[in-house]
Image: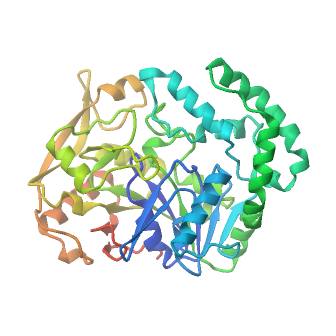
Amino acid sequence: MSNITIVGSQWGDEGKGKIADWLASRADIVVRFQGGHNAGHTLVIDGKVYKLHLLPSGIVRPGKLSIIGNGVVIDPWALTTEISELRHQGVNITPANLLVSENAPLILPLHGALDRAREEARGNQKIGTTGRGIGPAYEDKVGRRGLRVCDLAHLDTLRAKLDAMLAHHNALLQSMGASAFQAEDLVAALKDITPQILPFVGSSWQMLEKMQSSGKKILFEGAQGMMLDVDHGTYPFVTSSNIVAAQAAIGAGIGADKIGYVLGITKAYTTRVGSGPFPTELTDEVGETLGKIGHEFGTTTGRKRRCGWFDAVQVRQAVKTGGIHGIALTKLDVMDTLEEVKICIGYECRGKKYDYLPASQDLQAELKPIYEALSGWQQPLKGVRKFNELPDNAKKYIHRIEALIGVPAAVISTSPEREDTVLVQDPFQ
């Protein structure tokens, strides 16, 4: 297959940034196809750290075209800030290597205000939103009242569109005690940011069709993880978009038969940021160890991630619903010091055993994991780049995961460094 689609198979933060960057060395185009700047990818290249939120991971590689697809909701101020920060780190970003889809929805300041007001109003029932306006922007998209990137080229008609949007949003904001927005203020802000955005804007689907027809290799990059998918995740503690591989076609504007090999980025243990069910969560010393060694803090929010054992039931479900062909197993090195490692192989709840994650919010909150224990390897994995160099117990752990989830570990990451990566099965072939 000439193309690859990468999706997170857990609750996000699986290490997609490193794997996408590593694969981008052999791709011609990298496309981000869903989510917004609530996502965060951290790349470590030759000891230098790059933090990405909207820009595809391929942006740090010279000679690659990066595309922000129509399935992404774009905060233009966040995008220009991110471009500026990367330029200061020496990354060359121009319209020659970055294309922003003209039909991508815009996130406006009112979206973030509404997001935060709603979360505050939930009290102790918060869903864990980042407060960046992602959900409200997607709501406006399906409600057919949103602005899109292409609207920036027609500033003369912005006022009427904003008036229609504000009639809806200001009523909601004021009902929660938040301040209303004025159309003229938003128009002025958009007029100010437009010159910085328009040079990058174009028809992304046409560019992808052209590149596909000429035999170029495309890497489709998703954000978050499958358990945050609005349909297949732990609803309502989810994001506002679909994360399954099929969304790559929709969010990029390309045929579903073109998404290629689907690689599920999968952490060797499990983490989650924010609220929501987490059957294998560890609140003991092991959980603290995983969080400390793994530097488990959100790239976007800085929030501490909850840590737990690997959940094979959840990942197997992500494999089936997400169309995953193989996984990239990341952060295996974080578990180097553990004497024993555990894998969740099922759940118990109300006297019944489950071999899948039930959709009910009530049941998800009560699930108790059924574990299988294996011996740890207690050897440092940093620098390992060949499968046969892995300790025997690490190999056993990997093979057991493969058997439980039903797909192979095609790629294994042994440190945050780009080159500390074991290629077992080439996704591009």
Q: Residue at x 61, y 62 (%)?
A: 257
Colour scheme employed for the rendering of this structure: rainbow
Q: State whether residue 271 is above or below residue 327.
A: above
Name the residue rendered at 51%, 26% in the picture.
120
Residue nearest the observer in this picture, 319 or 194: 194
Q: Nearer the viewer, residue 91 or 334?
A: 91
Q: Is residue 272 above or below residue 405?
A: above
User: Residue 165: where, in percent of width, then height?
Assistant: 78, 33
For this view, does 337 lie left or right of residue 353?
left
Residue 223 or residue 4, whichever sits in front: 223
Residue 369 on image: x %, y %? 23, 36
Give the x, y percent position of residue 424.
32, 73
Location of residue 126 in the rendering, given as x and y in whole percent from the top left corner: 45, 27
* Residue 259 in sight in this render: no
The residue at 76%/41% (across/down) is: 186
Q: Residue at x 76, y 67 (%)?
A: 199
Numbered circles on residues, count: 0
Placement of 360 over or under 328, stated as above or below: above
Indicate the quadrant where residue 357 lies.
Answer: top left
Which quarter of the picture shows residue 136? top right
- Identify which residue, 185 or 55, lies in the foreground: 185
Left or right for 230, reference 293: right
Is any atom of residue 12 visible in this view?
yes
